[in-house]
Amino acid sequence: MSILQTTQLNIPAGMIDFGVGQPSLSLLPQAALKQAAEHRLSQGDASFLQYGAEQGDGYFRLTLAEFLSKHYGLPVEAGQLLITSGASQALDLICTRFTQPGDTIFVEEPTYFLALLIFRDYHLNLVGIPMDENGLIVEALEEKLAQHRPVFLYTIPAFHNPSAATLSAERRERLLRLSQEHNFLIVADEVYQMLDYTTPPPPPLAAHIDTNHVISLGSFSKITAPGLRLGWVQAAPARLEPLLHAGLLESGGGLNPFTSAVVQSLIELGLQDACLAHLKAVYQQRSAALSAALRQQTPGLSFVEPGGGFFIWLRLPEGRNAQEILVEARGRNVSFQPGIKFSSAQGLQNYLRLSFAYYDTAELLDGVNRLAQVINKDT
Ligand SMILES: Cc1ncc(COP(=O)(O)O)c(C=O)c1O
């Protein structure tokens, strides 16, 4: 890594890397954030430069609650929100406060590969629950509950990373019932809930925090910009309590008060809504273009067209290995994430994940051309 590296990305020149699950630089709202920062810095109140309230600035939480109420279509209250440095940091905090090394947690198979790294940092015992195109298979969950007592289930209920699946309304109900019967927590990572392009998802699992069995996570990374490092936990106040007493918050105060204040202006000025609408329009086009190109050029691959989110999850014919294909693909300047990364059990070898968030339509089509040459070679 160069000492002058700025972003997490390091894509070799000429490569189209479908593995990148981040927005294009051109989609990051510099002008809107400039306007929001100027608005906030001209209020004559420097409080947001002080150590912040542990739960996050109360006025920001009020503004965020109003924004979420509108976009979730259900009442959200400021007292249910804890401000975080993104969903990753929220997951880390949940592990710190709710788990001990060796505890069992359930994850989806596949699941968000970088969450697996966080869970491994805490030496948790991971048990995978299979999914299909309607999300987590609840019968399989029930079977695993007969063998294990998980502290929590980590699920991505809307426009899943990597599978793009959305948990059906019926399965949500059954999942909620099981969480109460077997007394485990559902950690619902709902970062893609607002990014629907063709099919609105059911209401978020956040609608059920009053059961005391749901903690919902959200983030500005997907609806504004990842560099803000700003997100939230939504839970019943009794569930937030242990998180609030983390040493991290007692020492450093609430997370990201400066960014929260700027994003408060972004929301108040209507710029956040505009940003979300723009992202949805762009991603919708990219998603449709990538799906159409794949259908046309790689008929040997099967996938469910995404209704939202960032990803397409491709299935190779049985017996083919995405990691082997990746080596050849990189030789042709195209890359992706192999399925095995998303498995807690070294499985899913005949899957691969593509993202349409980073490249424009022309680049996506170019990437599919390159990929098709590799994939179609042996079929
Ligand atoms: C399901 C899921 N959760 C969390 C994250 C990371 O979120 P944040 O940037 O808020 O830490 C991602 C990013 O790819 C994601 O796909």
Image (cartoon, rainbow, N blue to C red):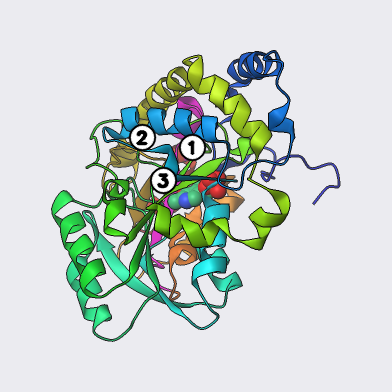
- Mark 2 highlights which residue? 194
- Mark 1 highlights which residue? 222
Q: Which residues are magenta?
A: 347-367
Q: Earlier in the sequence, mark 1 or mark 2?
A: 2
**Circles 3 and 1 in contact, beta carbons < 8 Å:** no
Q: Is residue 207 visible?
A: yes
- Mark 3 highlights which residue? 80
Q: Is residue 106 visible?
A: no
Q: Please state which amino acid type lies under the numbered disc 2.
A: Met
Quarter location, residue 159:
top left
Q: CA distance from mark 3 to mark 2?
A: 19 Å
Residue at disc 1, CB closer than 8 Å to ligand 1: yes
- For the C terminus, the image quarter is bottom left
187 sits left or right of 91 in the view: left
- Magenta stretch encompasses residue 243: no
1 sits left or right of 131 in the view: right
**Circles 1 and 2 in contact, beta carbons < 8 Å:** yes
Task: Please tell me which residue lies in front, 53 or 154.
Answer: 53
- Magenta stretch encompasses residue 363: yes
Q: CA distance from mark 1 to mark 2?
A: 9 Å
Task: Tell me where residue 291 appears, x and y as whole percent.
Answer: 32, 37
